[in-house]
Amino acid sequence: MNSNKKCYINLLPLLLALLIISTFSGCGENYMSPEVALRNFSNRIEQDNLNGMTLTIYYMNSISTIHFPFNTEAFVAQGIYDAKKIVDEHELRKHIELLRQINADDLVPVSHELPMLVMLYYVFEVNGRTIFGFVPQAAGNDSSMYINGVEFEWIDSFFDVIRPFIPEEEVRRWDASLRSDKAMDGSVS
């Protein structure tokens, strides 16, 4: 009986380690690296596999609100957004050419000293599991974007993908703001 007790004691750390690994591996998909997430997204689109896919867009109608969250979880969980649009797989399929423009090929990481300011956020999900989330960001003289919490240089196609799904006045307001930042910087993408 003594040898059995030693066996259980020796296995206890191993079992605890396995429990911890399995617990955190289920959470990791929400924090998947942007490059991996976008490759997975592109593969799905190329295979025409939109089964269970949704696009949820959260945005503010005005910039007059003083308190903005600095993360997407607060923006969504606290209901700080003014509007929410859910686009199902059937509607997404009608705009598959826009979805095909989204990829990881042109991502260029950047880092500004300012924290992320969330006023518009969209997320692609499959059966409730996050593929990737996007936040447009203006920081000084240049626009950037956050994908799964990592900041990159601005790429128009990441904003273009939501144009058909939000009101035209919102598209114009956001487009003017993002374009004016790029115009000040002198860059075009």
Image (tube, grey):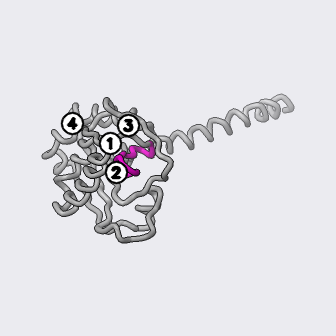
**Please, what secondary structure does the residue beneath circle 2 have?**
strand
User: Do the residues under discs 3 and 1 have CB atoms within 8 angstroms?
Assistant: no
Residue 44 screen position, x and y as percent: 27, 35
Label whose residue precedes the other's in the sequence (3 or 1): 3
Label whose residue precedes the other's in the sequence (1 or 4): 4
Q: Is residue 81 visible?
A: yes
User: Do the residues under discs 4 and 3 have CB atoms within 8 angstroms?
Assistant: no
Q: Is residue 55 visible?
A: no
Q: Which mark is residue 154?
A: 1
Which residue is more in the foreground, 117 or 82?
A: 117
Q: Which residue is mark 3?
A: 37
Q: Which residue is mark 2?
A: 136
Residue drawn at x 86%, y 32% is 2
Residue drawn at x 30%, y 48% is 184
**Please, what secondary structure does the residue beneath circle 4 have?**
helix
Q: Which mark is residue 100?
A: 4
